Image (tube, rainbow, N blue to C red):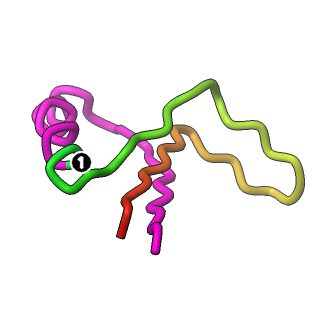
Amino acid sequence: MTAYLVLDLTVNDLTEFLPYVEAIPAFIAKHGGYVSKGADPVVMEGEWSPQRLVILEFPS
């Protein structure tokens, strides 16, 4: 069964976050995952206002 991880991120310190940016793609690939990246999210309904939205898809 496909599993999704939806992340609503706010990066407060880019310098501290960069090591994760470098390491995360290899971890995702190791587990057969796929990252969906795109334009700024558009809220269609409600008051949710994510700053950075990332969706990860894993085969199981």
59, 51: nearer the viewer: 59
Looking at the rendering, the stretch of residues picked out in magenta corresponds to: 1-27
Q: What element carries label 1?
A: helix
Q: Quarter holding the C terminus?
A: bottom left
Residue 4 x, y percent position in the rendering = 47, 63
Q: Nearer the viewer, residue 30 or 52?
A: 30
* Residue 13 percent across, percent down from the top left: 26, 34
Q: Which residue lies furthest to the bottom in this view?
A: 1
Read off the residue under disc 1. 28
Q: Which amino acid does label 1 sit on?
A: Ile
Between 33 and 17, which is closer to the camera in this rendering? Answer: 33
Left or right of 33? Residue 45 is: right
Percent across and percent down for residue 9 are 44, 47
Seen from the viewer's position, the closer of residues 24 and 14 is 24
The verdict on residue 23 being magenta is yes
Category of crowding for the residue at label 1, using alpha-carbon neighbours closer than 10 angstroms: few (below 14), some (14–19), many (at least 20) = some
Horizontal arrangement in the rendering, residue 4 relative to residue 51 (left or right): left
Q: Residue at coordinates 16% horizontally, 40% vertically from top-left?
A: 20
Q: Which residue is drawn at 11% across and 38% down?
A: 23
* Occupied quadrant, residue 57: bottom left
| Residue 59 to residue 29: above or below | below
Can you say whether 1 is above or below 13 in the image?
Answer: below
Indicate left or right for 51 with 33 as reference.
Answer: right
Residue 41, picture quadrant: top right
